[in-house]
Amino acid sequence: MTQEDSGTRWGVVGTGAIAHSFLEGLRAAPSARVTAVGSRTRSRAEEFGRAWDVPNRYGSYEELAADPEVDVVYVATPHPWHHPNTLLMLNAGKHVLVEKPMAMNALQVSEMMAAARANDRFLMEAMWTRYLPAPRLARELVADGAIGELCSVSAEFGINVPYNPDHRLFNADLGGGALLDLGVYPLALASQYLGELTVVGATRQLSPDRMVDTQTTVLVRGENGVSATLGCASRTALPNRAVLAGTAGWIELPAFWTASELVLHRQGREPERFHRPFRANGYEYEIEEVTRCLAAGERQSPDMPWAESARLAVVMDQIRDAGGLVYSPANVKAVPLG
Ligand SMILES: NC(=O)c1ccc[n+]([C@@H]2O[C@H](COP(=O)([O-])OP(=O)(O)OC[C@H]3O[C@@H](n4cnc5c(N)ncnc54)[C@H](OP(=O)(O)O)[C@@H]3O)[C@@H](O)[C@H]2O)c1
């Protein structure tokens, strides 16, 4: 086997925006190469395959699932299809990295975990932010006591996307809503530092058709007593900053969901700025983690284990249910709010 032939063989499900970004990251990840792409339409698979030099191009996801030249599949479809696409791939014997949020609700996540266990396959929610160098450094600094004892976390992720009821972010049939799409990032950050989360309160704004949230603000308490205030929005440009505050100072992660720097503020000292630029576009780090896990025979990443994806899904269910926004497990259609 030549060097070119070696490495983890990736298949990509869906040819949308993030699939392109992912492959840019994959080019910078050692021991990984893309061998196949599956699309709902053959022409899109061909177009994507030409753009990224993918040898095996399929006009259905089922054909990709049957490709023996694929070890691990990246599921890059809209939220309601994470569950069926992941089950298809796991049951065909593929390992799976599935985009965030892992699924529409906690029931679907539990079924995906059960399928990974039954098929003895790797499964991970693509919480790529966790694997970036700056957030990793923040973890180390907090663990080393750089800010004393952690007391609170605040984080938000908001962008102003022009309202379009057909857009993935606003369309309930496509699993829309700021919470599912964007809110999962601040929640995941909180869960990393707080452990089990209890939702203390939540407030939201809705889309004009009242089918999805366009803004959600949440107060949560962790099992360690630390609290977090979290926000997400699809019609508001937020600062997108995260702050980890402790008894001796605080760490700021500007643009935390794609952080390449952090600022450490120790009480009574000048701020210290740490730059941690990406090698490529940032997706290379989660890809490297999948490669590492597969080489080690691990079925979960210790940095984003199944239990944590399940925990995030439960919390998001609770936040949505409290607002009367229900995506039923069967057809994931939202029930309009009154
Ligand atoms: N990690 C990140 O930074 C990041 C950023 C953006 C999005 N995401 C996540 O990535 C996923 C996809 O987002 P995206 O922005 O790439 O979406 P997108 O541009 O709309 O692409 C989604 C792709 O999924 C496939 N698909 C399958 N069923 C579909 C359906 N019923 N309607 C529309 N498309 C369908 C399509 O590919 P084919 O037609 O080829 O089958 C489509 O191109 C979402 O889970 C999102 O949350 C992650």
Image: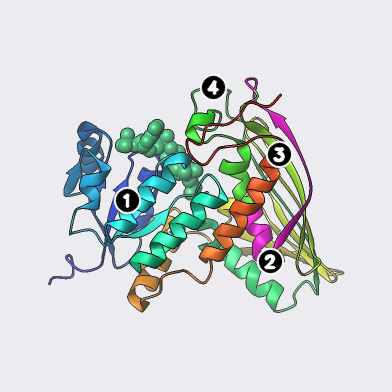
- Check disc 2 and report the residue beneath it: 195
Residue 201 vs 143, above or below: the answer is above
Circle 4 — which element?
loop
* Sooner in the amino-acid sequence: mark 1 or mark 3: 1
- Check disc 1 and report the residue beneath it: 88
Amino acid type for the residue under numbered disc 3: Thr
Quadrant for the C terminus, please: top right
Picture residue at 52% right of the left edge, 66% below the top: 305
Circle 3 — which element?
strand
Quadrant of the image where one finds ligand 1: top left
As measured in the structure, the alpha-carbon distance from the residue carrying label 3 to the one carrying label 4 is: 19 Å
Q: Is residue 178 magenta?
A: no
Which of the two residues, 51 or 334, is positioned nearer the viewer here?
Answer: 334
- Check disc 3 and report the residue beneath it: 216
Task: Kindly tell me whether mark 3's CB lies below 8 Å from ligand 1.
Answer: no
Quarter of the figure with residue 25: bottom left
Residue 193 vs 165, above or below: the answer is below
- Check disc 4 and report the residue beneath it: 164
**What's drawn in magenta, residue-wise?**
187-209
